[in-house]
Image (cartoon, grey):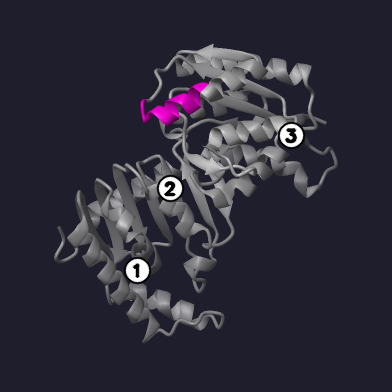
Amino acid sequence: MSKKYQVFVSSTYEDLVEERKEVSQAILECDCFPSGMELFPASNNNQWTVIKKVIDDCDYFLLIIAGSYGSLGIDDEGNRKSYTEMEFDYAVKKGKPVIAFFSDIAVKKDDAVDIQSLENFRKKVKDDKLIKYWKSKDELHKEVLRSLQKLINENPAQGWIKPDKPGDPSANLEELLNSSIQLGIIAIHPDGKSAKEILKNKISGKIKSLKILVYYGDVFLKTLKEEITAVETVQLLIAKKDSTLLNQVWDMETANKDNLKNNNQEGKVEVTKMENAVEYITEKKMGKFECREYSTQIRYALIVVNERWAWWTPYHPGIEVKDTPSFELINKDDASLINTCIKHFDLLWEKSPNRKNNV
């Protein structure tokens, strides 16, 4: 039976997106599974329990430190630290084998506190663990390949074992995980309960571009309208008011006895709320905002942040979006699912007319 290992990748994110891709690829080449912050939103104290559970389930811990200290959180003792340092401390506490990679990238001068905190963190790791250094993402890739294989040989872990028994439903786990990783699927959410929190964290901050495709988008637009107005460029695709498409959607949702929606009342109220949210964004938008209306039979919702991360919700007739599973996608390579979604969005955008009173 072949054994696979799960490796937790810990680092800051925005400044190391490409480096994390290289590290994930190197981990896959070592016949292991990468996991890390892509599974949960950063800068969210409510997710610390989830992070610890992911580290608990991992066999090895891989740390990358460059020029930024990272987003801050509160650890179990009430101390304010970066999530990267919290993850490292927890992995050490749990006795996870650790390998660390330091970069020569200049320290990001956010403020004096962060610089000192980063230096203290680097010293802590250096005093306790064997360190490897890298200057480019290609060099990092090679160092991870060499170091991870050596770590596995010297510190054998429990790992994941593929069963030999024919017909065992877990026998395809390895193939399923590999396929998901290759498609850029980093997390699956069983319903929409976590959508607002995750999207608010992803959209907050310096976002250059945002693509939004929704039916009527009441909850999303109303909840996140403040964050949307701060984005440099926003493209919003919404279903045309009073279109056959929307009437069919409401008919299907009304036919489901578990839904409280009423086709003639609640549906129209939601469209009104959506229109109010669009008008607010149009009025307050600091950058470029353009809204277009489509009338084709779209069967999913999509929110793309900076062409690199997306929230994708396939629609199921008769089931409301809040009760529908959603996927977090990243732009891993040309085979990533997010690229297909973006291409479809761009084609639909090209064919859709501008909404009246557009800015």
Between residues 69 and 258, which one lies in front from this camera angle? 69
Residue found at x 21% / y 66%: 279
Mark 1 vs mark 3, foreground winner is 3
* Residue neighbourhood size for the residue with mark 1, other residues' Cα within 10 Å, grouped as few (<14), some (14–19), many (≥20): many
For residue 148, side relative to residue 298 (left or right): right
Per the rendered image, the range of residues in magenta is 109-119
Q: Secondary structure at mark 3?
A: loop
Q: Secondary structure at mark 2?
A: strand
> Which dot marks residue 94?
3
Q: Earlier in the sequence, mark 1 or mark 2?
A: 1
> Which dot marks residue 216?
1
Q: Main secondary structure of the magenta part?
A: helix
Mark 2 vs mark 3, foreground winner is 3
* Residue neighbourhood size for the residue with mark 3, other residues' Cα within 10 Å, grouped as few (<14), some (14–19), many (≥20): few
Give percent across and percent down for residue 264: 37, 87
For residue 208, side relative to residue 12 (left or right): left
For residue 10, side relative to residue 166 (left or right): left
**Does residue 154 appear in this view?**
yes
Check if mark 2's residue and mark 3's residue have beta carbons within 8 Å.
no
> Which dot marks residue 310?
2
Q: Amino acid at mark 1?
A: Tyr
Image quarter (top left, top right, bottom left or bottom right) of the C terminus: bottom left
Residue found at x 51% / y 24%: 22
Task: Estimate the spatial distance between the alpha carbons at disc 2 and disc 3, rounded to whole Å.
Answer: 32 Å
